[in-house]
């Protein structure tokens, strides 16, 4: 997937808040109806993520990117000002932001790159959370700071982190992410929303959510006490209704 870096801010702040009202699979259901990309393998994580704050709900923001390599202490010697330069970059980007971190030591883990301190520092600069392809710690204190984290695992010790590169493409959980990409993420994983799909997305996901509720879900929840044959007949009709409504709304495209 190739998405332009430092993507334009197409959605208003109010529209971003509206996106947070749905989980990431629901956003995907709307997105797959309007995109020209391969919705079976494009734009979402291909490897499993872990959401350590699912009670916080979804997060939506624009990617600020970072590479780290905790096992290599030479990075600190090479650039003693790396953290200051990285934080200036993060602070210069308009909120809301999600810090997307590639750990170059993967699959090994040399401590947690994120914890209470990093969460609070990034929160102060307008970040709502992180997608870190490595380890984190201090989950309860990160949660207390209102900072969400998707990561690979937990770790007791902290990593000797020094920014290696930032404001650059990164690869996390099997997906390439570029600075400025719009991301929607929750306990299911994350979706990178291409620029060309952002304007029609809210209407599409609202339609798909209502369509499911009016047909398939309504039929299933009213089926108690019906015979198997009657229930199957009603499910078949509701599925046909669902598909027909989807075809009419999206010019013949049906997600499932």
Image: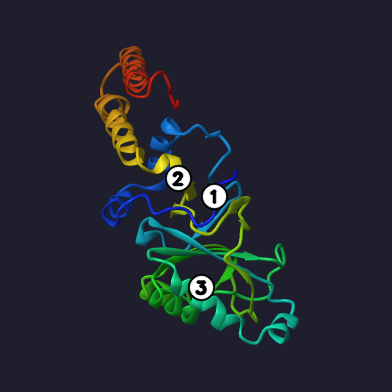
Q: Are marks 2 and 1 in contact (CB under 8 Å)?
A: yes
Q: State the residue at coordinates (50%, 57%).
A: 6
The C terminus: image quadrant: top left
Secondary structure state at the residue bearing disc 2: helix
The residues tagged by marks 2 and 1 sit, at their Cα atoms, a distance apart of 8 Å
Nearer to the camera, 243 or 219: 243
Q: Which residue is mark 3?
A: 89
Q: Is residue 219 left or right of residue 161?
A: left
Q: Residue at x 71, y 62 (%)?
A: 107
Earlier in the chain: of badge 2 and badge 3, it is: 3
Residue 66 x/y as whole percent: 59, 68
Q: Which residue is mark 1?
A: 4
Q: Residues within 10 Å of mark 1 (few under 14, many from 20)?
A: some
Disc 1 element: loop
Please give left or right for residue 193 compared with residue 22 in the image.
right
x 30%, y 13%: residue: 230
Q: CA distance from mark 2 to mark 3?
A: 22 Å
- Residue 195: give its label: 2
Q: Nearer the viewer, residue 48 or 60?
A: 60
């Amino acid at each position: 997937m190739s998405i332009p870096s430092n993507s334009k801010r197409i959605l208003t702040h109010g529209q971003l808040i509206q996106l947070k009202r749905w989980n990431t699979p629901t956003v995907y259901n709307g997105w797959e109806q309007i995109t020209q990309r391969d919705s079976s393998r494009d734009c979402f994580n291909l490897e499993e993520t872990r959401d350590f704050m699912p009670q916080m709900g979804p997060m939506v923001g624009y990617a600020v990117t970072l590479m780290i390599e905790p096992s290599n202490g030479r990075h600190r010697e090479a650039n003693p000002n790396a953290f200051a330069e990285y934080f200036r970059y993060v602070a210069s980007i308009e909120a809301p932001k999600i810090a997307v971190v590639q750990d170059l030591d993967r699959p090994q883990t040399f401590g947690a790159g994120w914890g209470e301190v990093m969460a609070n520092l990034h929160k102060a600069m307008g970040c709502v959370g992180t997608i870190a392809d490595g380890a984190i710690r201090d989950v309860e204190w990160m949660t207390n700071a209102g900072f969400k984290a998707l990561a690979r695992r937990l770790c007791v010790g902290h990593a000797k982190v020094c920014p290696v590169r930032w404001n650059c493409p990164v690869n996390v959980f099997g997906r390439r992410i570029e600075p400025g990409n719009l991301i929607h993420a929750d306990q299911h994983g994350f979706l990178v929303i291409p620029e060309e799909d952002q304007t029609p997305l809210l209407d599409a996901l609202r339609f798909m959510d209502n369509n499911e509720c009016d047909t398939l879900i309504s039929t299933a929840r009213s089926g108690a006490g019906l015979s198997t044959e009657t229930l199957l007949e009603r499910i078949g009709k509701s599925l046909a209704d669902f598909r027909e409504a989807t075809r009419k709304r999206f010019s013949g495209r049906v997600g499932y």
